[in-house]
Image: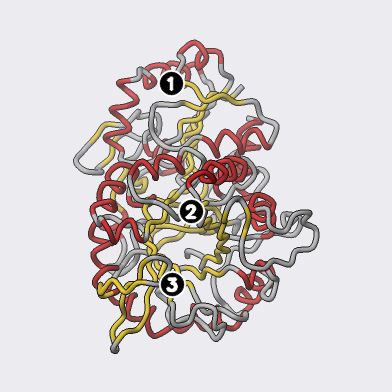
């Protein structure tokens, strides 16, 4: 039985993790490498790094962070942000990423999914999407959720799968930041249309929200969140123990392994 | 010194770093002289079987590897690298493997109910089905990280640990000094590191 995954997401801008953080025992709370190491040691099942670097000049800073992270983090690492071409896949994979997440780049040129999947395998291509309700339908928004593309989210998810995406990260703009739970209605619709793993994002505010996610939409494979983990509003090791106690399959580190 | 065989597939960075973090000397190489001197070999791999098998042949790495394996040098295949140790694979056609372990690599899809997801991605606990020095530092129920769409069938007693995904997926196989893991020990957190540590000690 495959465990449900809990995935912290680190938004990195100009070499620093953005979104407020509150860590004990970490010298530099905004250092992505330190933070990734902390999550590796406390039982995160996977990590996602989004490069939201504003300037081209600072892109090298990000690849340096990836290299340093990959030297100390021994769980799967997904990298997204500014992935517009197969050469961007190469750039982050060669620095230690295991999977690459595409969003706007795939909306602009959907063949990017096919080309990357053929070259690196389906398991390497994660299609990430920002979804918002418009006139009763689920639409894909681009540019960090600012622009309505007119694309139907369910159709786009299905197309992504057919083109070779190995996983989906589905972020609900409607619930993101509200902290009143994941977008169960949208995720359930999504699960009817695709068979590849779904990573739910947007809306988690407490431990119960994860339990509700995995029990109400059992097809969802993973829950992703950022600031609630960074701020320890929902401490990750506690969350996993709580979910395991609720009967949800979880990978729990043994005593002594958690550092 | 462990030689990690570089034949142009996959990212070997984290594998090398995980060994380094354990204090195990290692080198990523396709130099036959280096491979010849190595105490142990690791055959990594992601991607498609046929393509990887061709690259192994084109780089001459298959000969170097088989020679060492016959001499009794411990060899660990990881993920696709494990699959390559078997006799044959049915991924996009039919391809001969290295035949170091009996069995065939078959599509998971045909053996699990419709609606179950392929690839099999994620953390899955191990059930021990035999004995292996690689299991020395871990316990039944410990979870490891899988990403694959094909799996080994007919491996019989070579299967030392497995994970349930409707079928029992061979996770760790061993025939004499030839070892294989379908999961990625270098991505399986502390449990994976303990498996690599044990390989470093065989």
Q: In this view, does A22 lie to the left or right of A173?
A: right
How is colour applied across the structure in the image?
Answer: secondary structure
Residue extending farthest to the top is: B33
- Answer above or below: position of A180 versus B64: below
Q: Considering depth in this image, is A24 or B101 the residue closer to the camera?
A: A24
Secondary structure under the numbered disc 1 in the rendered image = helix
Mark 1 or mark 2: which is in front?
2
Please tell me which residue lies in front, A153 or A195: A153
Name the residue rendered at 59%, 83% in the picture: A208
Left or right: A2 with respect to B98?
right
Q: Earlier in the sequence, mark 2 or mark 3?
A: 2
**Residue sitting at x 43%, y 77%:** A172
Residue A130 quadrant:
bottom left
Q: Is residue B15 above or below residue B144?
A: above
Do discs 1 and 2 share a chain? no
Location of residue A104 with respect to B178 vertically, above or below: below
Q: Can you identify the residue that label 1 sits on? A: B65
Residue B151 placement (x, y as % from top left) = 36, 48
At mark 3, the secondary structure is strand
Expressed as whole percent of the image width and height from the top left, the position of residue A57 reads 51, 43
Work out whether disc 3 and disc 1 sit on a shared chain.
Answer: no
Q: Where is residue A203 in the image (x, y as percent from the top left)?
A: 52, 79
Output the chain of dot 1. Answer: B
* Tag shown at residue A231: none
Q: Label 2 is found on which chain of the structure?
A: A
Residue B77 appears at what percent x and percent y? 46, 35
Within 10 Å of disc 3 (Cα), the crowding (few <14, some 14-19, many 20+) is many
**What residue is shown with label 3?**
A171
Residue occupied by mark 2 = A78
Could you tell me which quadrant the C terminus of chain B lies in?
Answer: top right
Pick whichever, B156 or A242, lies toward us: A242
Which residue is pictured at 37% across the width and 17% down the height? B63
């Amino acid at each position: 039985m495959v465990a449900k995954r809990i995935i912290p997401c680190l938004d990195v801008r100009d070499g620093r993790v953005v979104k407020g953080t509150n860590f004990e025992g970490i010298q530099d709370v905004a250092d992505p490498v330190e933070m990734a190491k902390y999550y590796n040691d406390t039982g995160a099942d996977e990590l996602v790094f989004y490069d939201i670097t504003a300037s081209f000049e600072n892109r090298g800073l990000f690849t340096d962070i990836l290299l340093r992270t990959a030297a100390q983090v021994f769980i799967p690492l997904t990298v997204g942000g500014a992935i517009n071409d197969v050469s961007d896949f190469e750039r982050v994979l060669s620095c230690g990423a295991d999977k690459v997440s595409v969003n706007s780049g795939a909306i602009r040129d959907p063949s990017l999914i096919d080309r990357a999947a053929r070259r690196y395998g389906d398991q390497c291509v994660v299609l990430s999407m920002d979804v918002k309700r418009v006139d009763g339908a689920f639409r894909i928004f681009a540019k960090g959720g600012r622009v309505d593309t007119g694309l139907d989210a369910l159709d786009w998810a299905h197309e992504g799968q057919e083109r070779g995406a190995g996983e989906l990260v589905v972020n609900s703009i409607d619930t993101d930041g509200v902290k009143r739970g994941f977008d169960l209605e949208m995720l359930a619709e999504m699960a009817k249309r695709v068979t590849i793993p779904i990573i739910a994002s947007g809306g988690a505010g407490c431990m119960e929200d994860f339990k509700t996610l995995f029990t109400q939409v059992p097809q969802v494979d993973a829950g992703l969140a950022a600031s609630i983990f960074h701020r320890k509003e929902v401490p990750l090791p506690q969350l996993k123990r709580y979910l395991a106690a609720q009967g949800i399959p979880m990978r729990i580190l043994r005593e002594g392994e958690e550092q | 010194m462990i030689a990690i065989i570089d034949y142009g597939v996959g990212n070997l960075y984290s594998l090398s770093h995980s060994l380094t973090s354990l204090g195990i000397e290692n080198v990523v190489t396709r130099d036959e002289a280096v491979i010849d001197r190595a105490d142990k070999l690791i055959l990594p791999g992601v991607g498609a079987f046929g393509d990887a098998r061709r690259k192994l042949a084109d780089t001459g790495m298959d000969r170097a590897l088989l020679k060492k394996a016959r001499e009794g040098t411990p060899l660990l295949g990881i993920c696709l690298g494990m699959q390559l140790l078997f006799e044959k694979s049915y991924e996009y056609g039919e391809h001969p493997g290295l035949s170091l372990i009996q069995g065939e690599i078959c599509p998971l899809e045909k053996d699990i109910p419709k609606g179950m997801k392929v690839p099999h991605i994620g953390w899955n606990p191990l059930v021990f089905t035999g004995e292996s020095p690689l299991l020395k530092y871990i316990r039944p129920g410990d979870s490891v990280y899988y990403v694959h769409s094909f799996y080994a069938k007919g491996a019989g007693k070579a299967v030392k640990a497995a994970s349930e995904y409707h079928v029992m997926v061979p996770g760790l196989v061993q025939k004499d000094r030839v070892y294989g893991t379908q999961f990625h020990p270098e991505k399986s957190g502390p449990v994976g590191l303990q498996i690599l540590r044990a390989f470093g000690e065989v």
